[in-house]
Amino acid sequence: MLIVDRFEGDKAIVFDGEEQLVISREEFNVSVREGDVVFKDKSGIYVSDKTATDRRRQENLDLLKRIFNKERNG
């Protein structure tokens, strides 16, 4: 799973598991945002996988809620 960590100028920092990749920003659709799960489409451009991105964001929110509830409840 490729996840966009951040954009730095004309580069995108992307993680594939533990591996960090640096990819030209020009290879991404303009709608791709930091935190998106992406894949290369038929034209060779990285696009967001909306379903995977939404699922990942929800999993992260659920994890944060569990962590904060544990801290509050001791």
Image (cartoon, rainbow, N blue to C red):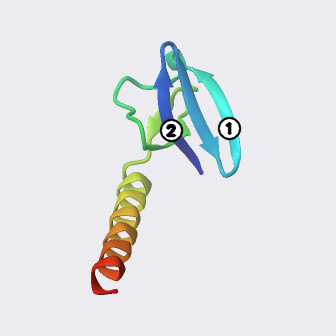
For label 1, count other residues whose C-alpha is less than 10 Å away and answer few (under 14), some (14-19) or many (20+): some
Q: Gap between marks 2 and 1, in whole Å?
A: 9 Å
Q: Are marks 2 and 1 in contact (CB under 8 Å)?
A: yes
At numbered mark 1, what does the secondary structure look like: helix, strand or loop? Answer: strand
User: Mark 1 sits on what residue?
Assistant: 20
**Vertical placement of 22 versus 19: above or below?**
above
**Vertical placement of 27 versus 2: above or below?**
above
Disc marking residue 37: none
Q: Residue furthest bottom?
A: 73
Three-letter amino acid code of the residue under disc 2: Asp
User: Mark 2 sits on what residue?
Assistant: 5
Looking at the image, which residue is at 66% across and 52% down? 17
Three-letter amino acid code of the residue under disc 1: Gln
Looking at the image, which residue is at 34% across and 77% down? 71
Q: Nearer the viewer, residue 50 or 72?
A: 72
* Relative side of 26 to 56, left or right: right
